[in-house]
């Protein structure tokens, strides 16, 4: 099976990329199949649903979703990356998972059943057909992000989501331009009189990923921190991927997750304070993150302050250092 063209969002710009074939779920001749993939592991969950799934976390632990894909009974497929949720203001983090032919890594977004760990959303509603990838659709979303982010029947993150909930749909359906699939009437997308709640149909899909008999996520190898909550201050991620920017994490108001080191940037992001620090080197051993000990070193100023900023480096003690790409 060949890969699938999908919309991505890189540095705020909607574009197109191609997935690897493995992200697409197998065909079921009787009903659609939706695949939900965790971004901090290689775990996936296949379930039957429609082309407009609502997804909530099936367990108590937070889950960071990298992509959702759909295969219809006729074999046609759709794919949607977590990049869109990030661009639309969801809580997000860098992923371990690679999905593209060029090792592309879409951002993953957090959903949390009990809304703990400072995470805001319990689930999402998504109309996958509205994200079928064309260059014209990508251009229209770039011109007007509200068409992508602020139309509940198309996509929305929900702070509260119950299993019995339904997801709204456009009634009457939107008119799309043949071939390029752009919205013929962009104003109709934001017309809430067309947002209709179904009286019956499939309920919310639970994302049941990597869960053991107790309902808690099973512990896996050291390269996979999915078992930890995103507010766990005892875990630090060290990544060699050029796709992972510690600077981007620290500068984003909506990023959530573990402290993070980018080996390519030589930067450490303290996710609690959203403060960037350098990684220690042969020419700098003060007020920096020491990769060997996974600790912050004191500055050379008064009481260990950084001589440049005057800030005292945070005391960091990690019980687990997770290394990606090493």
Image (cartoon, rainbow, N blue to C red):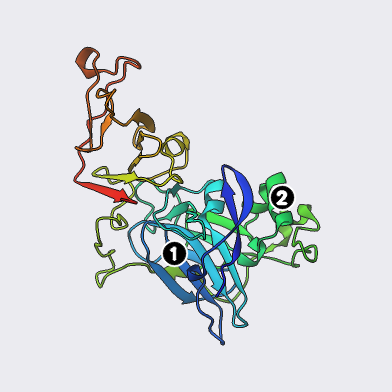
Q: Residue at x 46, y 46 (%)?
A: 243
Q: Earlier in the sequence, mark 2 or mark 1?
A: 1
Residue 100 horizontal/vertical position (percent): 51, 59
**Residue nearest the observer in this picture, 88 or 325:** 325
Q: Which mark is residue 319?
A: none
Residue 276 horizontal/vertical position (percent): 38, 30
Query: Which element type, helix, strand or loop, lies under badge 2?
Result: helix
Tell me the quarter of the picture where residue 238 sits: top left
In-image side of 170 versus 237 (left or right): right
Dot 1 crowding, Cα within 10 Å, few <14, some 14–19, many 20+: many
The answer to whether any part of residue 81 appears in the image is yes
Q: Residue at x 58, y 77 (%)?
A: 201
Q: Give the CA distance from mark 2 to mark 1.
A: 27 Å
In-image side of 21 versus 257 (left or right): right
Q: Is residue 118 above or below residue 278?
A: below
The answer to whether any part of residue 164 appears in the image is no
- Name the quarter where the N terminus is drawn: bottom right
Q: How many marks?
A: 2
Looking at this rendering, what residue extends furthest in the top direction? 302
Q: Which residue is mark 1?
A: 37
Residue 252 horizontal/vertical position (percent): 47, 37
Tell me the quarter of the picture where residue 245 sits: top left
Q: Which residue is mark 2?
A: 139
């Amino acid at each position: 099976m060949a890969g699938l063209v999908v919309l991505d969002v890189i540095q705020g710009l909607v574009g197109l990329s191609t997935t690897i074939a493995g992200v697409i779920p197998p065909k079921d001749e009787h009903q659609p199949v939706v695949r939900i993939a965790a971004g901090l592991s290689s775990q996936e969950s296949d379930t039957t649903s429609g082309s407009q799934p609502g997804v909530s976390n099936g367990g108590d632990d937070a889950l960071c979703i990298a992509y959702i894909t759909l295969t219809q009974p006729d074999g046609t497929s759709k794919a949607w990356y977590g990049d869109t949720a990030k661009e639309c203001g969801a809580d997000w983090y860098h992923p371990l998972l690679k999905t593209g032919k060029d090792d592309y890594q879409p951002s993953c977004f957090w959903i949390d059943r009990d809304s703990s760990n400072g995470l805001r959303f319990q689930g999402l509603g998504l109309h996958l057909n509205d994200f079928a990838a064309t260059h014209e659709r990508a251009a229209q979303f770039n011109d007007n992000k509200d068409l992508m982010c602020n139309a509940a029947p198309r996509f929305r993150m929900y702070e509260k989501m119950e299993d019995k909930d339904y997801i709204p749909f456009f009634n009457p359906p939107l008119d799309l331009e043949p071939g390029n699939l752009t919205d013929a009437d962009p104003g109709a997308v934001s017309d809430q009189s067309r947002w209709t709640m179904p009286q019956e149909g499939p309920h919310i899909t639970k994302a049941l990923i990597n869960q053991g008999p107790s309902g808690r996520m099973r512990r896996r190898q050291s390269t996979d921190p999915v078992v930890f909550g995103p507010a766990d201050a005892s875990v630090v991620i060290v990544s060699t991927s050029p796709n992972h920017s510690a600077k981007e994490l620290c500068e984003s108001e909506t990023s959530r997750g573990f402290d993070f080191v980018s080996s390519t940037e030589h930067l450490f992001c303290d996710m609690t304070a959203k403060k960037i620090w350098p990684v220690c080197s042969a020419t700098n051993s003060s007020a920096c993150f020491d990769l060997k000990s996974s600790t912050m070193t004191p500055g050379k100023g008064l009481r260990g302050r950084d001589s440049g900023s005057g800030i005292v480096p945070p005391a960091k003690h990690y019980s687990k250092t997770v290394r990606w790409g090493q």
